[in-house]
Image: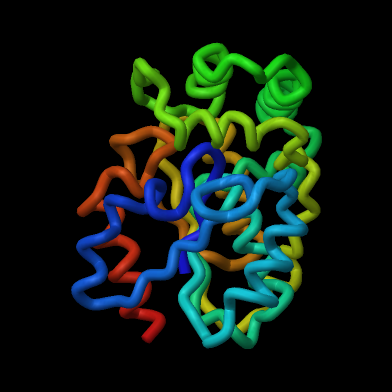
Amino acid sequence: MLVHGVLLGGREAWRAQRPLTERWTLLAPDRLGHGRSPDGVQDFEVDARLIAEQVLDDPAHLVGLSYGAIVAMVAAARRPEMVRSLTVVEPPAAGVVRGNEVVDAWDAELRRFLDGPLEDPREVFETFFPLAGVPLPIPDPVPETLRRGARALVGMRPPGDAELPLDVLASAEFPILVLTGDHRREYEIIADEIANRTGARRDVVAGMGHLVPDTGEPFNVRLETFLDHGE
């Protein structure tokens, strides 16, 4: 079960994981405001409830990227009996290290961005890509998929508001893996804290900044090794 972040829906965000379909059944639901799902304000609590109650019909390995990693953690804590393993990739959960000057400054910058004008997609991406660590040029023209993703940022609940259920995850029976891309110190600090407080395994897959799954084979091999160990 692959839970995407912002801007792209499930099919687009996890395109580099399609080779895994030779051995795994991959489900990549579209969160509200993305892909084929209806419009809706992005809220990790709402999305986590939808994932936990409407998507996790059978026990699954849960993988979340960015904002989707926060959603995945909250959903896993809601229904731990339905989770075989949990992998989170660069969750921007600044609240877990509140008081850290580096992360607090980054979180404040992200909040200013979300409070600002978000009408022009190109202007949105010019600010958001460097802030999130997306190492890609802004496409011209901007495709409708990204335009819809930009619109979905309006009113989004800031990821720094998340009060992650780390105690619940630490006591759960499923294994946890926390991955980062070694490009922004903020993600590394947050990931280290989550791993320390949950007993999760911790690793780095570098090369594509925040878009860690887009490394393709390096990410897929690391993920599949972890899933096989969980089996």
Is 123 placed above or below 39 here?
Answer: above
Q: Please indicate whether residue 191 sits to the left or right of residue 102 in the image.
A: left
Q: Residue at x 45, y 45 (%)?
A: 180
Is 139 placed above or below 37 here?
Answer: above
Q: Residue at x 39, y 54 (%)?
A: 11
- Point out residue 47 in the picture as x, y percentages from the top left corner: 69, 59
Quadrant for the C terminus, please: bottom left
Tally of numbered tags: 0
Q: Residue at x 59, y 15 (%)?
A: 120
- Point out residue 140 in the picture as x, y percentages from the top left corner: 35, 16
Is 49 placed above or below 81 here?
Answer: above
Q: Quadrant of residue 141?
A: top left
Q: Please indicate whether residue 154 sits to the left or right of residue 16 in the image.
A: right
Q: Quadrant of residue 117?
A: top right
Residue 101 visible to an observer of this rendering: no
Residue 151 visible to an observer of this rendering: yes
Q: Please indicate whether residue 112 sits to the left or right of residue 61 in the image.
A: right
In this rendered view, identify the residue nearer to me: 205 or 162.
Answer: 162
- Point out residue 126 in the picture as x, y percentages from the top left corner: 51, 14
Colouring = rainbow
Q: Residue at x 29, y 58 (%)?
A: 17
- Point out residue 151 in the picture as x, y percentages from the top left corner: 63, 31
In this rendered view, identify the residue nearer to me: 85 or 101.
Answer: 85
Is 161 placed above or below 153 here?
Answer: below
